[in-house]
Structures are given as structure tokens and as C-alpha cells.
Amino acid sequence: MLEYLPEQSPDGILQLMQQLRADPRPHTVDLGVGVYRDASGNTPVMRAVRQAQERLNSTETTKTYTALEGDSAFLSAMQTLVLDDERGAHIAAIATPGGTGAVRLGFDLVRMAWPDARVFHTDPTWANHLSILAYLGMEAVPFRYFDAASHGIDMDGMLQDLAQLREGDVVLLHGCCHNPTGADLNATGWQALIRAINAAGAVPMIDLAYLGLGDGIDADAAGLRAVCAACPEVLIAVSCSKNFGLYRERVGALLVQAPDARAQRLAQGAMTHLNRQTYSFPPDHGARLAQMVLDDPALCRDWQDELAEMRGQITALRGALAAALRARSNSDRFDFITAHRGMFSMIGASPAQVTQLREDHGIYMTRDARINIAGLGVDDVPHLARAMLDVGL
Ligand code: PLP
Ligand code: TYF
């Protein structure tokens, strides 16, 4: 039977990493995969996470199964972190393996509830959103979002395209730190989006993979909290990979806001069922570490401090790169880099320029010219600025 399997196209981001590892040049710059790196190029275990891990090691008495929906203390901690509200909203929640698990099961839930739902997504969006939707046989509809000329958001185009929404369609949004563009909605943009969604009776689904890496936890969550205040039903796919540095532990959660107690019960039942059908119990070790950090005031403060340091380093690199480009180009046409948020910016290079940056300058980025700002060492900034102008940007 195996010979009947279709060939799969590889993940472009991970393929790029392999290509970089095979590059014999002594100095290369890895701006590919979205992983935070500190000034010495290291992706650290965060201090509070390490402490929680030591505490867990010495106090853990069992590894027996948790619950199908995941550990309840973890789910409460996620809900408090993300929503921070006292509205008594009806929230159903499951722990998932990473944010990707939450995205996947979120789509599954939509399909169970409303088989004809179309998923409207920003153009562009994270490639895995599209491959998961294709795998599930769900219809993906792009809507205009990124304006290549201004490197900001095409509000008029976005609202025109969202006028096509029908009841039961889903609008997939990035909570903050848009991947791949770096362009986020402002408060006015979120309100316009909410009006378009509610006018159609559509359902927002928010992918939240970079909470705290833009402007801070509350600022980064403001858009999605406004959505939750205004829309009866909301799906939120949370990842703890980047903001807790827990990448390989696979920590995430799917939070679903329901309009009433009955819908909450149905959603909780379906979500628990999806965990059971997919892998039974979600992984617990990393989730417990995140929960211990969030529930211990001292650890939580230290985590927030370290997260602020990470965010500060990204902001500083954005400022340094924009300044270097401003000086070299004698123009402000690269200032958009400081307006973007999170790890990524799309710098507008053509595929040919992306190739030239790699071949002539050893600078690796994805084909869509997305750079991971956190991949830059301080010494790489002038090199990148020079190379960008050299290839004609
Ligand atoms: N969504 C987006 C937009 C991402 O960039 C990522 C990646 O890191 C994820 C979801 C999920 O990541 P993970 O499954 O590693 O938690
Ligand atoms: O976009 C990124 O680089 C991150 C990390 O299949 C990632 O989201 C990349 C590829 C992938 C899963 C995660």
C-alpha cells in the first residue's frame, strides 16, 4: 500500500534550516525559523521555567494520567493570562500539544459544528494554517491584509474582502506579532474588523503564538480581548512555545468562548472528545511548568521581566537595523521595520533578491522575504543593511 502514498512537499522554513546547516561558509546569518535568540545566539531556557522545573523534579509524586482536557490549573492559568477578565464568560478549554495542536483542533471543532464553514485568513498567513486547512479539506479564503507598498495594513482592501463573509464562516486572525509580515492591527482596525465579523454572523478564531513579544502582555492581548467583549463566539489557539521558551515541550491550549452555558457544555464536550480521538491525554510536563510559573508570584514576576528583556532586545534590533538602513540609503523608506511588532518583518525583497542575499551574503530568510529579527546578532546589523542595499532594495 505504501507506494500509493502521495509525495509531500517539505516545510519551506525547516528546509531552509537544513540548507543553512550545509552551508560551509564561516559566517552565515540565520533569519529563518521563528525562534528567539539572545545576543550570543542562544535560545535560553527561561530562568523561571528552570526554577519551576527544579521544583517539579523534587516534588512530583506521580506521572499518572491527568484528564482528557488537560490539567485544570493549567487551563485556568491560560485563561487568566490571555483573557484577564471578570465577565464570567462561558469558556471551554483544552490543553493541546503546542499552538499548532490548538490550531488543528480548533479547525476540527469548526468543521464538526458547521461543515460548510469557510476560513477567511490574512493574505499572507503562516504556511501551516493553509496546509492544515487543505489537509482537513476545509475551504480557505484569503483576504487582503498586508499592503506591500506601505508595509502596513490595507484596511480598505481588508474590509472590502470581509464583506463576502457569510454566517458561520470563520475569520482566522493573529492575536499580535503577525507571522510573516510583522504588521499588526491598531485599536481602530480591530473595531472595524469586529463590526465586519458581527455584521455577517461570522466567528473569529485568533492564533496567539507571540503574546508578550510585541508591546507587552496586556497591550498584545488588547485586540483579542476587544473581540471577546464584542463577539458571542470566539476561538483562541494559544502557544507557550515562544513566550515561555518551551518550544520542544509542546505547550498550548484551545480556549473557546461560548455565548451561554449550554453552548459552553457542548463545546467542552466536543473539545475533550477531539483530544481523546487524536491522542487521548495532552502532554503535561511543559504545561505544568507554565502553570507553576504563572501561579507563583515571584516566578511570574521574573518570567515577565525576562520576557520584557527579550522584547526589549527585539525592539532594539529593529531600531538599530532601521537606523543603519536610514544612514546608508539616505532615506526613511525602511522605517517600517520599527513599526512592525514581534519577531518578523517582511522586507519586500523579490525571490531573486532573497536568493542573492543568501548566495552573495550568507543571509538566510524565507522565500517571502520574512526576516526573524531575533536571529540578528548586533554585529550582523551593518552586514544586513549593506546587503539589502547591495541587492537593490
Ligand atoms: N501560529 C503561528 C502564527 C506561529 O508562528 C506558530 C509558531 O511558532 C504557532 C502557531 C505554533 O507554534 P507551536 O506549535 O510551536 O506552539
Ligand atoms: O514560522 C515560524 O518560523 C515558526 C516556527 O512547521 C515553525 O512558527 C516553523 C515551521 C513549522 C512549525 C513552526
Image (spheres, grey):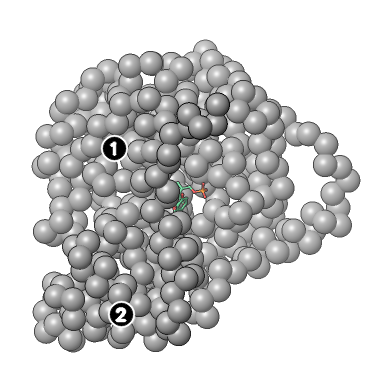
Up/down of 146 relative to 372, above or below: above
Most extreme residue toward the top is 262
Label 2 C-beta lies within 8 Å of the nearest ligand 2 atom? no
Q: Can residue 272 be seen in this view?
A: no
Between residue 341 and residue 44, name the one nearer to us.
44
| Residue at position x 43%, y 16% in the image | 113
Q: What residue type is labelled 1?
A: His
Element under disc 2: helix
The residue labelled by disc 1 is 121
- How far across and how far down the image is residue 175, in percent? 38, 46
Looking at the rendered structure, which numbered label has been put on residue 3? none
Q: How crowded is mark 1: few (under 14 residues within 10 Å), some or many (20 or more)?
A: many
Dot label at residue 361:
2
Q: In which quarter of the image is residue 203?
A: top left
Per the image, label 1 sits on a secondary structure element best described as: strand
Q: Looking at the rendering, which quadrant does residue 336 occupy? A: bottom left
Q: Where does the image place residue 144, in percent across and percent down from the top left? A: 18, 42
Of the two numbered discs 2 and 1 on the same chain, state the one appearing first in sequence. Answer: 1
Which residue shows up at 26% across the image and 25% down it?
A: 198
Report the number of discs.
2
